[in-house]
Image (cartoon, rainbow, N blue to C red):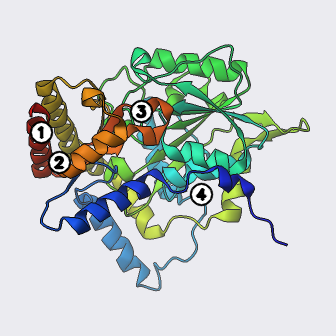
Amino acid sequence: MAFVNENYCNLKESFLFADIAHKVSAYAEAHPDKKIIRLGIGDVTLPLAKCVVDAMAKAVAEMGVQSTFRGYGPEQGYDFLHAALVKYYASFGVTLESDEIFISDGAKSDCANITDIFSNANTILIPDPVYPVYLDTNIMCGRHIIYMEGKPENDFLPMPDENVKADVIYLCSPNNPTGSAYTKEQLEEWVAYALKNDAVILYDAAYEAYVTDPAIPRSIFVIEDAKKCAIELCSLSKTAGFTGTRCGYTVVPHALVRKTESGKEMELNKMWLRRQTTKFNGVPYIIQRGAEAVFSEEGIKQCRESIAYYQENARIIMEGFDKVGIKYYGGVHSPYIWLQCPDGMSSWEFFDFLLEKLQVVGTPGAGFGKMGEGFFRLTAFGSRENTIEAMERIINGLKK
C-alpha cells in the first residue's frame, strides 16, 4: 500500500485566500448588480514598467533566432541577473558573492522549498500573526512549531525570548500581514539570538522596496555577522509587479554552516544548490531579462513610481481610518494596513460586514493566526479610483 503524508491531516482544509475567494464568488453570483471592490489579496494592479516589457520583448525576439536562442539555463539563474542583484545590494551597503544568489519563481516557492535542507527534528519559531505559507509548509513536514506573539504592545514585532529555544526562525520585515518593520537594533538582537543558539533565520524581505526610512534595514545582511545565521528570501512581485510574471531570489551566504544530526558540518549554500539543481529547472530566460531591467537605473526609477502610487493609496486608507477613529498599524513601509476591527467585531464578522453591507473585500486577521483575531488587513494595491471609493464606503458605513 502507498501510504500518504499524514501531516496533511493537520492542515486546515483550504488555504486562507481560497476561503475568501469562495465567499466573494458566492456573494457576487447572488448579487450581480453590486460592484465589489477587492482590497484583500496582495496582488498588484499596475502594469509592468516599460523598460521591463521592452527587455522581455527583446528577449522573446532573441528566442526566435538561431544564433541567440537559449534552451535550458542555469538552475540558479543567469550571470547577468546575478550581477544586477550584486550591484543592487551594494546600493544599500551589502556585499554579496554572485554564487550566493539563487533566482527562483518567487519568494512563496522558496519559503516553502527551503525547508528541504533542514531536518524535521528542528523546532520552528514562527511569528503570530503570520503569512500562512510559513506555518503550513512546516505542518506538512510534521515539525514542532512554537509561536512568538505579535500584538499592539510590541507593535506586532516580537523579539527574542532567551527562555525559548528554537532552531529555525521566520522573520518578515516589512511584515505581512501587519506592515510593521524591524529597526536595525531589533534585528541585531535577533542575529545575536540566532548565533547564540546556532539557529538559522529565514528572513522574508519581499517588501523591502517599500522602506522609506534609512533607519529601517532593507536587508538583514546589513547586520554584522548575519551571514553566519541568516538566509534572505525576496521577490519581484511587489517590487516590480511580477505577481503574474513570477521571479524572486534567495540569498544563502557561504558563511552559513550548520551540522547534521550526526555531527557533519554542511554549508547551506551548497545544500541549496544541490536541492535546486535536482528539483528546479530555473526561471525562463525571458523573465530573467525582464528582472535584470528592474534593477537598471531606469528600471528602479519606473518601479519606484509604481510603488509611490501604492504608497499614496495606503495614505488614503490611513487618512480614512483617522477620520473614523479606527486604530491601525503598517501602511508606511508596507502596502498593508492592519486595523483593529470596530465595535468589538471578530475579524470574520468584519469581513462579512464589509462584503455584504459595503461590497468591499479585505482579509480577516484570524486567517493569519490566533493573534490576528480582532484585526483586519487591507491592501493598497487597488486602483486609485477604487481605493478612494472603498474608503468612502467604509467611512460612511461606520458612521451609521
* x, y percent for residue 373: 42, 33
Q: In the picture, residue 315 is in which quadrant? A: top left
The residue drawn where x is 87% and y is 38% is: 261
The answer to the question of whether label 4 and label 2 lie on touching residues, with beta carbons closer than 8 A, is: no
Mark 3 sits on what residue?
373
Return the disc, 3 or 2, that comes first in the chain's sequence.
2
Q: Quadrant of the N terminus?
A: bottom right
Query: Which amino acid type corresponds to the residue marked 4 in the rendered image?
Result: Gln
Q: Nearer the viewer, residue 121 or 101?
A: 121
Q: CA distance from mark 1 to mark 3?
A: 22 Å
Q: Is residue 113 above or below residue 366?
A: below
Q: CA distance from mark 1 to mark 4?
A: 50 Å
Q: Is residue 228 above or below residue 75?
A: above
Direction from residue 22 to residue 29 in the image, left or right:
left
Mark 1 sits on what residue?
397
The residue drawn where x is 14% and y is 59% is: 35
Near mark 3 (Cα within 10 A), the count class, few <14, some 14-19 or many ≥20, is some
Dot 3: element: loop
Q: Quadrant of the C terminus?
A: top left
Return the disc, 1 or 3, that comes first in the chain's sequence.
3
Q: Is residue 278 visible?
A: yes
Label disc, if present, on residue 76 of the rendered structure? 4
The residue drawn where x is 16% and y is 38% is: 312
* x, y percent for residue 206: 43, 42
Mark 2 sits on what residue?
357
